[in-house]
Amino acid sequence: MAGQWYATLTGLGDLVPAEMRRSALKKVYDNNVMKFGKGEMGAANGMGPDGTIITTNQQVQEVWTGATFSVAALMLSEGLKDEAYRTAWGVYNVVWDKKGYWFRTPEAYQLDGMYRASMYMRPGSIWSMEMMGDRATANKAAPIPAAAVAAGK
């Protein structure tokens, strides 16, 4: 879905058929968001088909803040507004409200709140929510032209 997020953000179009995107995003929301940390922490990287946390390595047991914002932005672009904001809210809830990381937003954190790589840049992907949300509000008009993205518009 990362490739589709970037393609949507830059106006490159569909890489994955629309119904498959929505289905995958709903599954991510149901399993990786709502079944991880009571739905209050963002999107976990790895969840089994039955909704259990995969424990084969450290990174699948984490929420990556930037990836969570990217998934939320793609949800917005697909009209899944409630799911998008609930997903992004999980990062706010951990980073700002519960753990007090504030202006040290980490790359990743685990269910117990342990984090790594504070002041990481990837959480800047939250701005893609703004871009895709604006476009979705304007009735899912044409994709954002790549030239406008490059120019920062």
Image: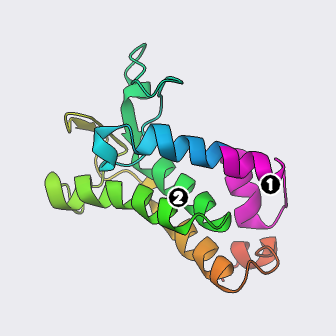
Q: Residue at x 76, y 45 (%)?
A: 20
- Mark 2 lies on residue: 72
Q: Residue at x 72, y 83 (%)?
A: 139
Q: Quadrant of the C terminus?
A: bottom right
Q: Does residue 124 appear to the left or right of 3 in the view shown? A: left
For the question of whether residue 32 can be seen, the reply is yes
The kind of residue tagged 2 is Ala
x, y percent for residue 114: 21, 35
- Mark 1 lies on residue: 18
Q: Secondary structure at mark 2?
A: helix
Which stretch is magenta?
1-23
Between the C-alphas of marks 2 and 1, the distance is: 16 Å
Magenta-colored stretch includes residue 12: yes
In this rendering, the label closer to the viewer, 2 or 1: 1
Query: Marks 1 and 2: in contact by CB < 8 Å?
Result: no
x, y percent for residue 145: 80, 75
Q: Quadrant of the N terminus?
A: top right
The kind of residue tagged 1 is Ala
